Image: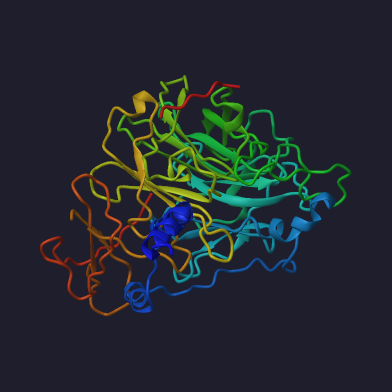
C-alpha cells in the first residue's frame, strides 16, 4: 500500500504547473484591480464643490435639429456625427475688461452665436456669426468650435471658427471699443493661404507664437479625411472611418500656419502661410480631437501636443527660430511596471482634450490628457503627465514625463472607480463653494521628494487638514490658461 504522504507529493508535482498558473493569475488580478471609492468617501469629496447651472440662450431662428444629414455610406454613424460640434468659449468682445461674452457652437442649430454671459446683464441681444462673402453651404457644412484672440493685432478680440466641410473662418472685430457687439462688428475672412475652397473636417485648433517672432501662429487639427463629403446626403462616393481603433493614420491632414501680415480699420485682414514638411505622414494624418501648446522647457517656445482619437498622441519639442520652424518628436520612457499606453506618445487610447498646469508646485508645467474613461463606453484612462525633473531629456529625444493619474485618483474620473491620492510633499486641491463662510483647503495630498506618488490613498477629513503637511488656508479663485523617438518628414 502506498504511503499517503507520498501520494500527496506526487499529486502536487503532477499539478504544479496548474497551481503556479492559478497563483500567477491571482497575483496579476490583485495588482491590476482598479481603485475604488466607497459612498462616504465620494460624498466627502463631492460636498466641497458647489455649482449653479445657468441656461444659455438657444438660437431660435429655425427649429432645432436632432439629426444631421450625412453621406449615405455613413448612415449607421449618423447619430454620433450629429452629436459632434458642441463648444463654448469666453471672451471680452466689448472691451470692458471682463471675459463676460460667450461664443457658443450648438449642433442642434449648427450656428455660432454670441451673447452676454448669463447674469452679466442684458448688454446686447444674442446674434449669429455668418461667414458672409465666403462659400458656405449649410446643408453640407457645420461649425465645430470657436477660439477668441486678437488675430490681426489691432487690440480688438477676434474669433476663429472652424468647421466640418470647409476651411476655418476668421471673424475679425471692427467694432468701436466699448460698443455693444453685433453682427456688423465682425467681418469674415479666410486664412488667406489660397485654400478656402477645400473641404476640411477640423475638430481642434489653437494659436501660439511657434517661432518666437512675436506673432500668433496657427495649429489646426483635422479629423475626417480632407475632401470627404461627410455631411452631404447626396454624395455619390463613399467616405471612410478610421482604419483601426488603436493605430489609425488615415484621418485629415494636421497643419501649421505662420502669421504673415495683418491690417486693422474698417476692412481688417490677416494672412497666414502654411508651413509644410514639419511632421511625418503618420503625425499629419492622425484623427486629432485636441491640440495644446505651452512652453515646457523654459526657452520661450511652446511645445505642441496632439491628442488623437483612435491612436497614439504626438508630443513635439519646439526647436524653432524666428522665420524657421523645427520640431522634434518626443516619446516617454517605459518603466518595468508601466503599461505601454501610459507612456507619452505610445498610447492607443482616444484622446479628447489636453491642458497644462503646474500640479505639484515644482515650477515646471505638467499636462493632463482626457481620454474615454467611462464604464458604459471604454474604460481606458486619462493621463496626468508630471515632469520627472530630467532637464536634459528633451535634447535626447525623450519626453521627461511620467503618468501619475492612477496615484492621484484622476485616471478614471468619469467612472466610479477613482480614489484620491496621498503620501509626503503637499499638494492642495480646493473647489469652489457657495457656502457663506470662505471655503478652506480640505484635503492635503502629499508628494514624496522623488516626485513619484504612492498608490496608497488617504482621505483626510474635510474639517481637519494635516498641519504638518499643509496649513489650512482660505481658498482663492483661480483660473487656468489651455526612449528617444525619430520620425522622418513626409
Q: Position of residue 79 (x, y in %)?
A: 72, 61
Q: Position of residue 471 (x, y in %)?
A: 13, 64
Relative to residue 360, is residue 409 depicted above or below?
Answer: below
Q: Is residue 327 visible?
A: yes
Can you tell which quarter of the image residue 99 is in? bottom left
Relative to residue 102, is residue 387 depicted above or below?
Answer: above
| Residue at the image position 25 percent from the left and 72 percent from the top | 439
Can you tell which quarter of the image residue 445 is in? bottom left
Q: Is residue 381 visible?
A: no
Can you tell which quarter of the image residue 402 is in? top left
Q: How many marks?
A: 0
Q: How is the image coloured?
A: rainbow
Specify the farthest residue to the front: 1
| Residue at the image position 43 percent from the left and 75 percent from the top | 52
- 450, 188: nearer the viewer: 450
| Residue at the image position 69 percent from the left and 44 percent from the top | 242
- 187, 59: nearer the viewer: 59
The quadrant of the rendering that contains the N terminus is bottom left
Q: Position of residue 268 (x, y in %)?
A: 57, 37
147 vs 281, left or right, is: left
116 vs 366, left or right, is: right
The quadrant of the rendering that contains the C terminus is top right
| Residue at the image position 11 percent from the left and 65 percent from the top | 467
Relative to residue 211, is residue 83 depicted above or below?
Answer: below
Q: Position of residue 27 (x, y in %)?
A: 39, 57
Amino acid at each position: 500500500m502506498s504511503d499517503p504522504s507520498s501520494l500527496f507529493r506526487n499529486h502536487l508535482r503532477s499539478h504544479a504547473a496548474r497551481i503556479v498558473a492559478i497563483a500567477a493569475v491571482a497575483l496579476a488580478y490583485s495588482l491590476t484591480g482598479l481603485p475604488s471609492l466607497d459612498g462616504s468617501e465620494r460624498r466627502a469629496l463631492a460636498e466641497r464643490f458647489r455649482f449653479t447651472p445657468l441656461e444659455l440662450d438657444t438660437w431660435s431662428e429655425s427649429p432645432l435639429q436632432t439629426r444631421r444629414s450625412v453621406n449615405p455610406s455613413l448612415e449607421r454613424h449618423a447619430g454620433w456625427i450629429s452629436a459632434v460640434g458642441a463648444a463654448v468659449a469666453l471672451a471680452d468682445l466689448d472691451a470692458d475688461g471682463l471675459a463676460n461674452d460667450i461664443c457658443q457652437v450648438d449642433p442642434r442649430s449648427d450656428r455660432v452665436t454670441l451673447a452676454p454671459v448669463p447674469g452679466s446683464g442684458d448688454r446686447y441681444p444674442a446674434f449669429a456669426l455668418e461667414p458672409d462673402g465666403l462659400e458656405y453651404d449649410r446643408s453640407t457644412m457645420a461649425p465645430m468650435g470657436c477660439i477668441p484672440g486678437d488675430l490681426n493685432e489691432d487690440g480688438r478680440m477676434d474669433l476663429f471658427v472652424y468647421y466640418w466641410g470647409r476651411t476655418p473662418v476668421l471673424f475679425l472685430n471692427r467694432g468701436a471699443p466699448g460698443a455693444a457687439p453685433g453682427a456688423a462688428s465682425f467681418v469674415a475672412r479666410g486664412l488667406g493661404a489660397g485654400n478656402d475652397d477645400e473641404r476640411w473636417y477640423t475638430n481642434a485648433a489653437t494659436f501660439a507664437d511657434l517661432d518666437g517672432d512675436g506673432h500668433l501662429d496657427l495649429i489646426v487639427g483635422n479629423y475626417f479625411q480632407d475632401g470627404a463629403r461627410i455631411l452631404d446626403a447626396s454624395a455619390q462616393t463613399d467616405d471612410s472611418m478610421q482604419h483601426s481603433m488603436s493605430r489609425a493614420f488615415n484621418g485629415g491632414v494636421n497643419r501649421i500656419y505662420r502669421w504673415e501680415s495683418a491690417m486693422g480699420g474698417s476692412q481688417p485682414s490677416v494672412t497666414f502661410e502654411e508651413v509644410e514638411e514639419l511632421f511625418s505622414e503618420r503625425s499629419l494624418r492622425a484623427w486629432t480631437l485636441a491640440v495644446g501648446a505651452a512652453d515646457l522647457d523654459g526657452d520661450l517656445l511652446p511645445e505642441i501636443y496632439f491628442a488623437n482619437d483612435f491612436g497614439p498622441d504626438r508630443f513635439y519639442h519646439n526647436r524653432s527660430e524666428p522665420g524657421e520652424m523645427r520640431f522634434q518628436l518626443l516619446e516617454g520612457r517605459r518603466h518595468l511596471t508601466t503599461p505601454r499606453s501610459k507612456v507619452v506618445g505610445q498610447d492607443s487610447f482616444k484622446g479628447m482634450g489636453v491642458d497644462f498646469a503646474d500640479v505639484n508646485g515644482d515650477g515646471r508645467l505638467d499636462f493632463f490628457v482626457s481620454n474615454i474613461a467611462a464604464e458604459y463606453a471604454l474604460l481606458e484612462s486619462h493621463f496626468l503627465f508630471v515632469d520627472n525633473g530630467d532637464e536634459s531629456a528633451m535634447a535626447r529625444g525623450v519626453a521627461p514625463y511620467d503618468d501619475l493619474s492612477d496615484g492621484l485618483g484622476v485616471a478614471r474620473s468619469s467612472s466610479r472607480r477613482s480614489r484620491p491620492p496621498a503620501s509626503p510633499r503637499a499638494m492642495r486641491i480646493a473647489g469652489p463653494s457657495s457656502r457663506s463662510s470662505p471655503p478652506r483647503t480640505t484635503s492635503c495630498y502629499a508628494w514624496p521628494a522623488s516626485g513619484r506618488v504612492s498608490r496608497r490613498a488617504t482621505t483626510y477629513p474635510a474639517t481637519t487638514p494635516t498641519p504638518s503637511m499643509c496649513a489650512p488656508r482660505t481658498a482663492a479663485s483661480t483660473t487656468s490658461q489651455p526612449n528617444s523617438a525619430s520620425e522622418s518628414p513626409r
